[in-house]
Amino acid sequence: MITENVRKQLADYRKHGKKLKYLINYLMGLIDDEDDFENIIIREMKALAFNEDEIVECLEYHFGFDMSWHPMSVNYRKDENNG
């Protein structure tokens, strides 16, 4: 669960020029084994005015998440076309 204090800290980091990758990395260190991990990150980063496609791309390329379930992923539904 993301507390209001964490949201304020993220907003402060954003205001001081921290990049998306840094903010996601920071947030990942605070989230405890949530089932909806990727969606929590997307929601919190969108609240900081990042574009959803940029967030999904960062999660895929910088953090190695399988985001093929997300419509903004470059890999969206690729497995369905190969079958």
Image: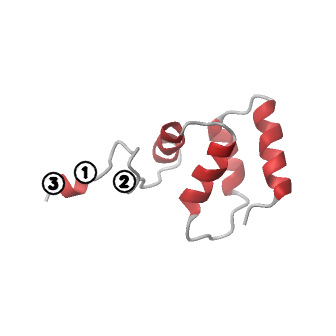
CA gap between label 2 and label 3 equals 13 Å
Q: In the image, what residue type sits under mark 1?
A: Lys
SS category of the residue bearing label 1: helix
| Quadrant for the C terminus in the image | bottom left
The colour mode here is: secondary structure
What is the C-alpha distance between the residues marked 3 and 1? 7 Å
When asked about the image quadrant of residue 33, the answer is bottom right
Task: Give the residue at mark 1.
Answer: 78
Q: Secondary structure at mark 2?
A: loop
Q: Say the numbered circle drawn on residue 6.
A: none
Q: On screen, 73 above or below 4?
A: above
Q: Pointer 3: what residue?
A: 82
Mark 2 and mark 3 residues within 8 Å of each other at the beta carbon: no
Q: Given contact means CB atoms under 8 Å apart, are the residues at marks 1 and 2 in contact?
A: yes
Instruction: Report the quarter where the N terminus lies.
Output: bottom right
**Within 10 angstroms of label 3, few (less than 14), some, or many (20 or more) residues?**
few
Q: Earlier in the sequence, mark 1 or mark 2?
A: 2
Q: Residue at x 80, y 61 (%)?
A: 3
What crowding class fits label 1: few (fewer than 14 Cα within 10 Å), some (14-19), or many (20 or more)? few
Residue type at numbered disc 2: Ser
Three-letter code for the amino acid on which mark 3 is drawn: Asn
Tag 3–tag 1 contact (CB < 8 Å): yes
Give the mark nearest the N terminus, 2 or 3.
Answer: 2
